[in-house]
C-alpha cells in the first residue's frame, strides 16, 4: 500500500516517517502526477497560508479535489485540517472545501501557543492519545455528516471525520502515535480492494473496527 503525503510545506517528513514505521510506502506529493497509484493522502501540519499558496502555484488544487472525490482517505493534521475545512473563521477562502466544519485558526492564543493533552478517541480504542497542539486550530462547528472523534475536557472539538476525510487539530505524527495513520491505511486498503463478494463501498462506515 502506498500513501501520499502532501509535501509542499510543513512537517511532511514526520508523516513520511510514521507511514514507513507502520509498513506503508510513503509517496511525497508535490505534483499532480504523484497522486497516481496512492491509496490515501496525509496533509501535514505547518502554515496553512503558505500551503494554500503552494497548492495554487503548483496546480494541485483540482487534482487534490479529484483525488478526494474518488473516496480515498485523506488525513489532515493541524494546518492540514484548516486546508480541508469548508469554513475558516474570519472569512478566509477555503482551500479544499472537503470537510463540513468551521475552524478557528490559532485558537489557543499567545499564552498557550503549544500544549499537550491526553485525549480519548473511542474509534482508536481505549488507550488515550497523546495530543500535541502547536498554534492549533479548534473546530467551532460541525455539519450533520461529521463525526466528532475527540474533544478536550472543556468540550472543544479537536478531531473529526466525515466519510473519507479525517482531521485532527493536534499532531499524531509528532507524538509517535501510529493509530490514525493505521486507520488511514486500513481505509485505503478497503477502498482499493473491497472485501470479496461485497459491493464496492466508496466510503468506509464508522462501524469499522480498529486496524491491526
Ligand atoms: N497555525 C497554523 C495555521 O494557522 C497551523 C499550525 C500547525 O499546523 N501546527 O496554519
Image (spheres, rainbow, N blue to C red):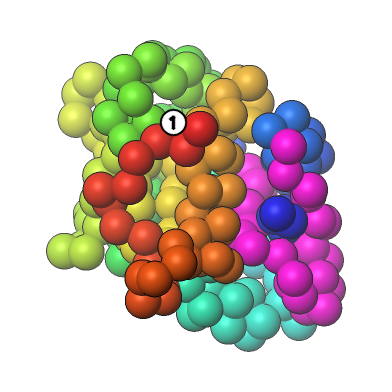
Task: Respond yes or no on whether mark 1 lies under 8 Å from ligand 1.
Answer: no
SS at circle 1: loop
Residue 24 % position (x, y): 72, 44
Image quadrant holding the N terminus, namely bottom right
State left or right for residue 201 relative to residue 59. left
131 above or below 101? above
Magenta segment:
23-48
Please check the rendered image and state whether residue 25 is part of the magenta-colored stretch, yes or no. Answer: yes
State left or right for residue 173 relative to residue 118. right
86 above or below 69? above
Please check the rendered image and state whether residue 34 is part of the magenta-colored stretch, yes or no. Answer: yes
Tally of numbered discs: 1
Residue 17 appears in the picture as rendered: yes
Residue 102 appears in the picture as rendered: no
Q: Residues within 10 Å of mark 1 (few under 14, many from 20)?
A: few
Look at mark 1 in the image and give the residue it sits on. 109
Residue at point 81%, 70% (across, down): 34
Residue 140 % position (x, y): 26, 49
Residue at point 55%, 39% (across, down): 182
Residue at point 35%, 52% (across, down): 161
Residue at point 47%, 37% (across, down): 211
Image quadrant of residue 45?
Answer: top right
Residue 72 % position (x, y): 53, 67
Image quadrant of residue 205?
Answer: bottom left
**Residue reaching furthest front?**
197
Residue 203 % position (x, y): 38, 67
Q: Quadrant of ligand 1?
A: top right
Amino acid at each position: 500500500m502506498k500513501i501520499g503525503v502532501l509535501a509542499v510545506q510543513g512537517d511532511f517528513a514526520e508523516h513520511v516517517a510514521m507511514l514507513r514505521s507502520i509498513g506503508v510506502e510513503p509517496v511525497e506529493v508535490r505534483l499532480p502526477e504523484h497522486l497516481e497509484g496512492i491509496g490515501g493522502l496525509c496533509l501535514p501540519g505547518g502554515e496553512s497560508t503558505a500551503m494554500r499558496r503552494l497548492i495554487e502555484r503548483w496546480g494541485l488544487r483540482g487534482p487534490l479535489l479529484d483525488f478526494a472525490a474518488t473516496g480515498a482517505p485523506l488525513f489532515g493534521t493541524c494546518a492540514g485540517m484548516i486546508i480541508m475545512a469548508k469554513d475558516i473563521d474570519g472569512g478566509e477562502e477555503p482551500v479544499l472545501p472537503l470537510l463540513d466544519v468551521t475552524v478557528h485558526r490559532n485558537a489557543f492564543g499567545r499564552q498557550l501557543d503549544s500544549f499537550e493533552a491526553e485525549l480519548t478517541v473511542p474509534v482508536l480504542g481505549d488507550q488515550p492519545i497523546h495530543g500535541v497542539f502547536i498554534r492549533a486550530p479548534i473546530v467551532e462547528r460541525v455539519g450533520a455528516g461529521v463525526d466528532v472523534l475527540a474533544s478536550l475536557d472543556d468540550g472543544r472539538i479537536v478531531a473529526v471525520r466525515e466519510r473519507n476525510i479525517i482531521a485532527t487539530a493536534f499532531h499524531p505524527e509528532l507524538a509517535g502515535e501510529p493509530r490514525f495513520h493505521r486507520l488511514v491505511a486500513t481505509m485505503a486498503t478497503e477502498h482499493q480492494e473491497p472485501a470479496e463478494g461485497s459491493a464496492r463501498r466508496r466510503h468506509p462506515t464508522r462501524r469499522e473496527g480498529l486496524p491491526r
